Image (cartoon, helix red, strand yellow):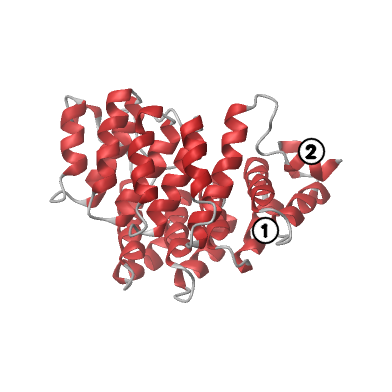
């Protein structure tokens, strides 16, 4: 991708797809992930331009991608999103998480400030972000992340637990600090077995919407069909927080079984915009997972054709 980083016109063409509200959302998502994979200043700027969009889901995903890119150039924009109390909480939460993923110490002050935000999902995210930045990156004493994502918490040190059952107990213990429960979550994910996936799915009934949403995200990374029933039941629950339902929809899109596609098809007209858009994008992800000839981040081909 390094040669493409120097081709600003190609990147701008992809950015035009991302920022064209007349295009189907699934095409814009592919453009976003193409830009994430290319990286560099022009890609960052194209993604930042998208924060004026009306889609909460798309802006949330833009913040996520900027965090995963770990480019300090994105810090000022992400800080401004976090500070904008008129922005949707789902987007602000993701901006805070992205700042922790980038890890610039200069962001600690603003993250500390918003640990007292009236929105609990934002305040909890900022608390986790501060803790992660203070702790630093994981080292050889923790389990390896097979998914290569930049996570909001480091896994627990390997020597601190003996079994999946013990990790499950920590995960579900609401008397534990939220960061510690997140650590158990990522340890279970890294084990990556049916047993650890089923243990994780029990966290979909936890007390914190932020926590439940992260469990759904992790289950999407694992792509384990043994959790389809649990994820579907949360998507079915119209009283559940939309940030949790949306993440369950995307997780089902990653797992991509026929059952997942049937479930997602029921909710593409959900009354919650972020949920129905997530189902639309998730169905597109199903196509990717089930078609070897389909390239998900295919905006590069369109931009250069």
Q: Is residue 298 left or right of residue 244?
A: right
Q: Which residue is mark 2?
A: 301
Of all residues shown, which one is farthest toward the bottom?
A: 86
Q: Is residue 296 visible?
A: yes
Residue displayed at 40% across by 30% down: 145
**Badge 1: few (under 14), some or many (20 or more) residues near its Cα, within 10 Å?**
some
Of 68 and 202, nearer the camera is: 202
Q: For the C terminus, give its image quadrant.
A: top right
Of all residues shown, which one is farthest toward the left?
A: 175
Residue displayed at 69% across by 54% down: 18
Q: Answer with mark 1 or mark 2, whichever residue precedes in sequence.
A: 1
Q: How far across and down, in percent of the image, does residue 239 sit?
A: 33, 60
Q: Is residue 141 visible?
A: no
Q: Which residue is mark 1?
A: 45
Q: How far across and down, in percent of the image, does residue 158 sit?
A: 24, 28
Q: For the N terminus, give its image quadrant.
A: top right
Q: Nearer the viewer, mark 1 or mark 2?
A: 2
Q: Is residue 37 left or right of residue 254?
A: right
């Amino acid at each position: 991708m390094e040669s493409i980083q120097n081709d600003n016109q190609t990147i701008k063409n992809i950015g035009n797809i991302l920022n064209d509200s007349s295009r189907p959302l699934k095409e814009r998502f592919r453009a976003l992930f193409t830009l994430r994979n290319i990286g560099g200043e022009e890609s960052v700027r194209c993604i930042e331009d998208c924060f004026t969009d009306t889609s909460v889901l798309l802006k949330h995903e833009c913040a996520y991608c900027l965090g995963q890119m770990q480019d300090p150039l994105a810090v000022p924009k992400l800080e401004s999103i976090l500070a904008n109390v008129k922005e949707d909480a789902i987007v602000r939460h993701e901006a805070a998480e992205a700042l922790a993923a980038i890890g610039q110490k200069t962001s600690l002050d603003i993250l500390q400030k918003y640990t007292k935000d009236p929105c609990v999902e934002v305040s909890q995210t900022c608390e986790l972000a501060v803790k992660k930045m203070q702790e630093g990156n994981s080292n050889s004493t923790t389990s390896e992340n097979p998914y290569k994502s930049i996570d909001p918490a480091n896994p627990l040190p390997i020597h601190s637990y003996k079994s999946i059952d013990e990790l499950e107990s920590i995960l579900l213990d609401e008397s534990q600090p939220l960061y510690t429960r997140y650590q158990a979550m990522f340890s279970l994910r890294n084990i990556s077995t049916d047993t650890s996936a089923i243990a994780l799915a029990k966290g979909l009934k936890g007390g914190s919407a932020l926590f439940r949403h992260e469990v759904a995200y992790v289950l999407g990374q694992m792509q384990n069909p043994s959790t389809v029933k649990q994820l579907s039941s949360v998507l079915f629950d119209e009283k559940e927080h939309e940030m949790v339902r949306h993440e369950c929809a995307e997780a089902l899109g990653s797992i991509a079984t026929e059952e997942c596609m049937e479930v997602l098809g029921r909710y593409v007209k959900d009354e919650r915009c972020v949920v129905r858009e997530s189902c639309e994008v998730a169905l597109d992800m199903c196509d990717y997972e089930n078609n070897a000839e389909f390239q998900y981040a295919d905006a590069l081909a369109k931009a250069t054709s």
